[in-house]
Image (cartoon, helix red, strand yellow):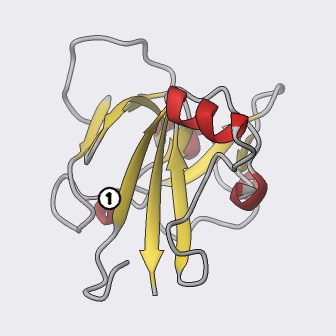
Amino acid sequence: MDKEHNFQEEVVSFWSVAKRKKDGGRVVQLSNPESDTLLNTLRINDMFLMGTNDLEQDLNLELRSYLKSHLYRVQKLSSKFYEFRLAQKRASIITDAPEYIRINNFGESKTGWLTYNPVKVEVNIVGQIIKKKKKYKNESNSFLVKILLLLIRL
């Protein structure tokens, strides 16, 4: 967040990331590492639990049907425009809730980031939904098409 507590973002292309890695840099670069904190990254097909509150730390304690109905994947993204679709649905032209969610801002409005409270998760090989561990400080995956960085400035 900046001084007014607003989120900041940076959309990075695959080629920018490839150049960073070639030059020995990191995939995720903070403009001011001492005061900036990385909140989240988004890549196409990343999985998120959307519209959930008070999740247990261990998602195995949550009802599987509840998690399934709130599990979305990133379909498209660009600057301040993030499209999510239910994980079990294929790409389609339907843009109605609950199958489709569009986030256009970082606030608490109808299409706001804080409204949906996204929690990044991964689905393992046996179908368990697990909260994604953050490893952004040493992120080494250079095969990214687009990354969205949400920063908090203190």
Please state if 9 lies on the left or on the right of 88 as rendered: left
Please state if 15 lies on the left or on the right of 56 as rendered: left
Name the quarter where the N terminus is drawn: bottom left
Q: Residue furthest right?
A: 126
In this orientation, does residue 122 appear? yes
In this orientation, does residue 83 appear? no
Give the residue number, with chain letter if any, for mark 1. Answer: 113
Q: Residue at x 29, y 31 (%)?
A: 100
Neighbourhood count class around disc 1 (C-alpha, 10 Å): few under 14, some 14–19, many 20 upward:
many
Task: Please determine whether, in this image, residue 18 is positioned above or below residue 134.
Answer: above
**x and y, in percent, of residue 77 in the image:** 35, 34
Q: Nearer the viewer, residue 9 or 116?
A: 9
Task: Please determine whether, in this image, residue 33 is positioned above or below residue 61.
Answer: below
**x and y, in percent, of residue 152 in the image:** 45, 75
Q: Residue furthest front?
A: 23
Q: Quadrant of residue 68 in the image? A: top right
Query: Helix, strand or loop at disc 1?
Result: helix
Give, as a three-letter code, the residue at label 1.
Answer: Trp
Task: Please determine whether, in this image, residue 137 is positioned above or below residue 90.
Answer: below
Q: Nearer the viewer, residue 133 or 78?
A: 78
**x and y, in percent, of residue 129 in the image:** 70, 42
**x and y, in percent, of residue 86 in the image:** 42, 29
Q: Residue at x 61, y 52 (%)?
A: 28
Q: Residue at x 46, y 88 (%)?
A: 154
Q: How many marks?
A: 1
